[in-house]
Image (tube, rainbow, N blue to C red):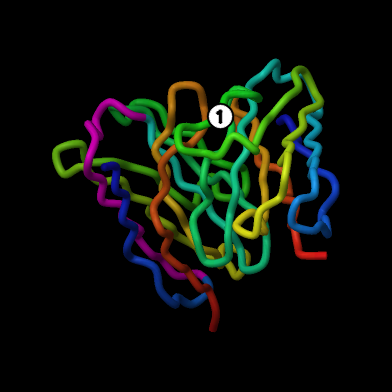
Amino acid sequence: EVQLVESGGGLVQPGGSLRLSCAASGFTFSTYWMTWVRQAPGKGLEWVANIKQDGSEKYYVDSVKGRFTISRDNAKNSLYLQMNSLRAEDTAVYYCARDHSGGWYPSWGQGTLVTVSS
Amino acid sequence: DIQMTQSPSTLSASVGDRVTITCRASQSISTSLAWYQQKPGKAPKLLIYQASSLESGVPSRFSGSGSGTEFTLTISSLQPDDFATYYCQQCIGYKAFGQGTKVEIK
């Protein structure tokens, strides 16, 4: 059974940093693109970033470029999102998701809440 | 970037109703579209991929259609478990989501 478990969320002040983790199990992690999607309170889903199987390609939504870095450790079956220079508008539940080659997301984690506030 | 627009934003319906949600892409995406269901406090659940393919385990009352720029998600007979928010997502390039359609009890 595919399992994705996010961790690392919490309360952080504007301008601060946070590192999210996603522990994967139940599938061969190193063979899948992986993605972060976020959802602000009461709002819709927003695609944030994704990363190729070997980490050689990474893509970001414009609003986080230069502030967020997606990475992975295939030996540890783990996905990460380093978030720097956080803003109030980054407040959201962050989900990790496993990509299907066709571009949709069959598997999601339960999400971790990031709150940016002073 | 391709933008996705869903309508309506909110839909009031009764158990047993046939429900249709529309998603429009700002440019052609062929059949590269997925639909998700999300309930409060839960992660999204994949319902439909490639515009019309039913994900394994999803009830057959859900169906998807369309190609190019216009797509629909249909629930043939709304069940109590179907009251939720539904999102479309384009599956090429920047994988934008629609803004969501909340299906609520009439």
Write the residue at 80% across / 23% down: B69
**In-front residue for pair A88/A8:** A8
Split into 4 quadrants, where in the image is the C terminus of chain A? bottom right
Mark 1 — on which chain does it sit? B
Write the residue at 52% across / 66% down: B41
In the picture shown, does residue A44 fall above or below B31? below
**In-front residue for pair B9/A33:** B9
**In-front residue for pair A70/A67:** A70
Split into 4 quadrants, where in the image is the N terminus of chain A? top left
**Position in image of residue B81 (x %, y %):** 60, 57
**In-front residue for pair A45/B44:** B44
**Position in image of residue B45 (x %, y %):** 51, 46
Quick one: SS at disc 1?
A: strand
Residue B73 within the segment the image draws in magenta: no
**Position in image of residue A59 (x %, y %):** 49, 34
Q: Is residue B69 visible?
A: yes
Q: How busy is the neighbourhood of tag 1: few (under 14 within 10 Å), some, or many (20 plus)?
A: many
Residue A16 within the segment the image draws in magenta: yes
Write the residue at 60% across / 49% down: B37
In the picture shown, does residue A87 fall above or below A13? above
Write the residue at 55% across / 50% down: A64
Q: Which residue is mark 1?
A: B54
Most extreme residue toward the front, as rendered?
A: B16
Most extreme residue toward the bottom, as rendered?
A: A118
The image quarter in which residue A11 lies: bottom left
The image quarter in which residue B29 lies: top right
Kindly identify the amino acid type of the residue bearing the numbered disc 1: Leu
Q: Is residue B84 visible?
A: no
| Residue range (magenta) | A15-32
Q: Is residue B84 left or right of residue A47?
A: right
